[in-house]
Amino acid sequence: MSEQIPGWFTEIFQDQGTGFSLKVKSKLHEEQSQYQKIEIFETETFGNLMVLDGCVMLTDRDNFLYHEMMTHPALFTHHAPKKVVIVGGGDCGTLKEVLKHPGVEEAWQVEIDERVTRVAEKYFPDLCTANNDPRANFFFGDGIKWIADAPLESIDLIIVDSTDPVGPAEGLFAVDFYRNCFMALREGGMIVQQTESPLLHTSSIIKKVHDDMRQAGFDGVRTLPFPQPVYPTGWWSCTMAGKGKKLEFFREEDAAERPFVTRYYNAEVHKAALALPEFMKNELDLD
Amino acid sequence: MSEQIPGWFTEIFQDQGTGFSLKVKSKLHEEQSQYQKIEIFETETFGNLMVLDGCVMLTDRDNFLYHEMMTHPALFTHHAPKKVVIVGGGDCGTLKEVLKHPGVEEAWQVEIDERVTRVAEKYFPDLCTANNDPRANFFFGDGIKWIADAPLESIDLIIVDSTDPVGPAEGLFAVDFYRNCFMALREGGMIVQQTESPLLHTSSIIKKVHDDMRQAGFDGVRTLPFPQPVYPTGWWSCTMAGKGKKLEFFREEDAAERPFVTRYYNAEVHKAALALPEFMKNELDLD
């Protein structure tokens, strides 16, 4: 669905009745991988754009919002994350943010489609600058199985950086998967997952993730909204939860004195992201 | 620019290289007023949509985000706002939120185009439920002149609820206008203005508003970002400032115990909106 308006890439969200367009200079790449159609466009104003099966994944200009919020709030809430596993995240942007934390000793990117990573290395080199970090490890294959096979209590933080909960990613929004994550996490471990749009999905996807994570044994489930212009409604969220951990506090001083550069995240933004709009509190049955 | 995709309303932001579309059931209304083309569409999923000169103004579904954030943070920061003036705001949504505050004794909506208000009364009745409140006053005409002619130190809060800073609204983003606002405000008075997209406009429009407001004599200029799906990037902002007032505190207890319903705003969201992303702090030269 990319040529409704000549010279523009358009993504139509038929179910939501909305659409988003970016003006395109040229198409840089197109391939059908084993799993999906991968397209890269050069846009007029948002840098390069990655599209999977017609869905906008990321652009150069605004991916920092998503990648910083998928990582730093969780990493600064865990007391000392050493081993971090990213399920999905083939563009490597999440991995890059994780490895900014000097305390992380080992990070795994478990992505089903190796071609996404290879294409990102070519067209999003800024996201891949940490790929040669000796702490970075890559596994290309089924993340659900990888987590199910992981040694018990071996991981500090699991980041579920997936596509929408349809098709291959559907199994990543399910209580069975969360239960396996729970088993694979050390005591005090955490999970964080992208959970779609607060405006569109609070009473459906986000509510279900809360329920499923609790059912899997997690405590202190929290959803953090953040802006993400190229996704539907321009407003997105992640949801995090802890194993034997309420997530009421975070390492605020460490966040304030972080030894790396961020563009969206800071300690105040972290606290702010924990404040839920009134309608979300109501729809999620929070106080 | 409404028929690029048949059956959809599309707004193309040519300068920004982005576009936004809503699926349309029917066009309910179209007229050319003295000032602009006014169109109303019934959308599939966002309720009714108002478009002025091709630009999306508001929809039923998400206008609560904008209207609540244009009003309650300022009204709960002022120590006791009694007289409130809205410049623009012809759809009456801002007026409705203002009049939720029992302490407000007198509110003025100073809108240049009476037709916008008449059309809103017909197609957005939910926004106009306070129009018959005895505290509500309407003036249809030039807001810049109205403010310039206002008695000195007669107003507690001025809310600039305008279109983009081009065409008729350009004079509302200017130091001369802010100086007249400053003169018209009582000591401890405040101004709040919509200031476009944090991602697109921080170093241009938002920075200039900060500089201009300070130059006009205001203190404690603060920008509050918030989501607004139907505007470019889905991320918007308002900027507020005080006359002899630093805006460091707000009436948090009153906000928490507000005697009216909100859908986005609450005391935690208010505090959260004061936390600026790292790039905004940098671009605005804040600490």
Image: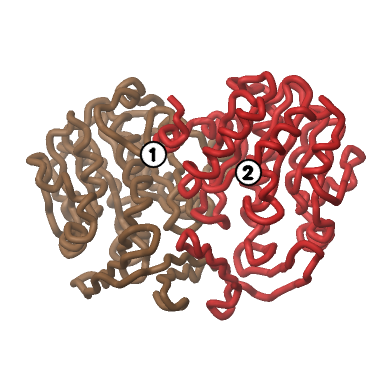
Chain colours: A red, B brown
Q: Is residue B279 above or below residue B6?
A: above
Closer to the camera in the image, B174 or A66: A66
Residue B197 location in percent, x, y?
Answer: 47, 53
From what the image shows, is residue A254 above or below residue A205?
Answer: above
> What kind of residue is marked 2?
Gln
Name the quarter where the N terminus of chain B is drawn: bottom left
Mark toward the viewer: 1 or 2: 2
Look at 55% across and 44% down and name the residue there. Answer: A205
- Distance of label 1 from label 2 (alpha carbons): 21 Å
- The residue singled out by tag 1 in the image is B264
- Residue type at numbered disc 1: Tyr
Q: Position of residue A42 (x, y in %)?
A: 68, 69
Q: Residues within 10 Å of mark 1 (few under 14, many from 20)?
A: many
Residue A97's x, y, as percent?
74, 41
Q: Secondary structure at mark 1?
A: loop
Q: Which residue is mark 2?
A: A194
B157 versus A170 height, above or below: above
CB contact under 8 Å: marks 1 and 2:
no
Which quadrant holds the C terminus of chain B?
top right
Of the pair B263 and A251, the residue shown nearer to us: B263
Same chain letter for marks 1 and 2: no
Q: In this rendering, would A179 be left or right of B205? A: right
Residue A76 in picture, x, y percent from top left: 68, 28
* Numbered mark located on residue B286 in the image: none
Q: Residue at x 89, y 37 (%)?
A: A135
Q: Chain of mark 2?
A: A
- In the rendered image, the residue lying farthest to the left is B134
Side of B93 where A267 appears, left or right: right
The residue lying at 90 percent from left, 47 percent from top is A132
A284 or B104, which lies in front?
A: A284
Tell me the chain of label 1: B
